[in-house]
Structures are given as structure tokens and as C-alpha cells.
Image (tube, rainbow, N blue to C red):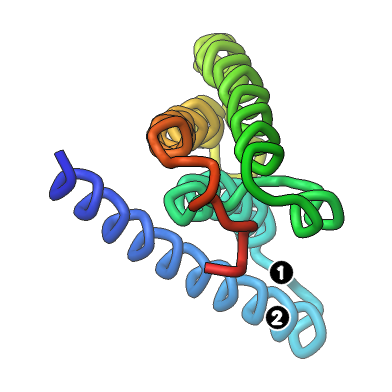
């Protein structure tokens, strides 16, 4: 199972790197063609925008794989032991609820947008939005694994994020 998650993480890193690079090239071409030729390809800005959505939702699981998620570090950096463990558990539970909602409604959105096409590229919009339930589902798995690790770790060994 660990090998599967390592392969998935490597694939996501590769995909995010490629998408970021492609987005950079597209935006650069957009700027050059706009200011040098006073013309821009209609699909370039649209593709860059969709790539940005993909980068965001494919990067979320990568952050979660390192145990990172939104937290109020001002609070968590000041507490230790059982209190910190409790706060981490609560944060993971709220993350699980939120990600479950995102996966559920993301799937509904993909189904509803399967008949719509993008204006410039004529791409089915479900291709754009499918990354939302996928990224949230993978992140959900990582958060559940993190919650299990937190529950199994004694309170005295729990450290604030970033101090490891």
C-alpha cells in the first residue's frame, strides 16, 4: 500500500510540475502575442485558467501527504501534549467532513457539466472539473491516514507542525 501512495505522489508531483510549466509557457506566449502582434490565441488564456484549477487541486493531496493543512499556527505552536493532539484530531475531522462534501458535490458538478463545452477550446467542462473530486478524494485519504497516525501517537510525542 505504501508503494502505491509513493507512486501516486510521484505521479502527482510530475503532473503538477508539467502543468505549471505549460501554464507558464502559455501565459508568456499570451503576453508576447498581445504586445508584439496585437493578437492572442483565443484558447491560450482559457487553457491556462483550466491548468491553474488542475494545479491547485492536484497540489492539495501533496500538501496533505506531508501532514499540512489549514491550521491556526498561532494557537497550535503554543500548546503541547494532549491539547495539541486534540486540536490535530479536531482539525482532521473537520477536514474529512469538508473533503467528503467536496468529493460528493464535485461528482455532481462533473455530471452536470458533462454536456457543457468551453467557449474557446470546445472542451467538455467535465474534463476541467473532474480534478475537483479526484484531488479532494486523494487528499481525503491522506487526511484519514494522518488522523490514524495522530490517534496512535502518544500525546507526549505530538509536535507542532513545522517543528519536526
In the picture of the structure, the residue carrying the numbered disc 1 is: 40
* Mark 2 vs mark 1, CA separation in Å: 5 Å
Q: Is residue 135 left or right of residue 106?
A: left
Q: In this view, does 79 lie to the left or right of 121?
A: right
**Total labels drawn:** 2
Q: Which residue is drawn at 70% across and 35% down?
A: 87
Q: In this view, does 84 lie to the left or right of 117?
A: right
Q: Which residue is drawn at 51% across and 11% down?
A: 111
On the rendered image, what quadrant is the N terminus found in? top left
Q: The residue tagged with tag 2: helix, strand or loop?
A: helix
Relative image position of residue 41 (x, y in whole percent): 65, 64
Relative image position of residue 155 (x, y in whole percent): 54, 42
Relative image position of residue 3 (x, y in whole percent): 13, 49
Q: Relative to 25, is 149 above or below?
A: above
Relative image position of residue 132 (x, y in whole percent): 54, 32
In the picture of the structure, the residue carrying the numbered disc 2 is: 33
Q: Residue at x 70, y 80 (%)?
A: 33
Amino acid at each position: 500500500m505504501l508503494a502505491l501512495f509513493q507512486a501516486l505522489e510521484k505521479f502527482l508531483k510530475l503532473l503538477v510540475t508539467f502543468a505549471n510549466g505549460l501554464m507558464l509557457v502559455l501565459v508568456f506566449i499570451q503576453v508576447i502575442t498581445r504586445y508584439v502582434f496585437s493578437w492572442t490565441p483565443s484558447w491560450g488564456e482559457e487553457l491556462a485558467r483550466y491548468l491553474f484549477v488542475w494545479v491547485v487541486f492536484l497540489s492539495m493531496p501533496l500538501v496533505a501527504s506531508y501532514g499540512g493543512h489549514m491550521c491556526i499556527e498561532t494557537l497550535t505552536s503554543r500548546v503541547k501534549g494532549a491539547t495539541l493532539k486534540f486540536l490535530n484530531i479536531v482539525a482532521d475531522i473537520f477536514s474529512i467532513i469538508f473533503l467528503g462534501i467536496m468529493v460528493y458535490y464535485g461528482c455532481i458538478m462533473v455530471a452536470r457539466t458533462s454536456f457543457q463545452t468551453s467557449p474557446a477550446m470546445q472542451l467538455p467542462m467535465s474534463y476541467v472539473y473532474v480534478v475537483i473530486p479526484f484531488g479532494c478524494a486523494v487528499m481525503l485519504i491522506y487526511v484519514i491516514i494522518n488522523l490514524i497516525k495522530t490517534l496512535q501517537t502518544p500525546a507526549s510525542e505530538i509536535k507542532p507542525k513545522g517543528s519536526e
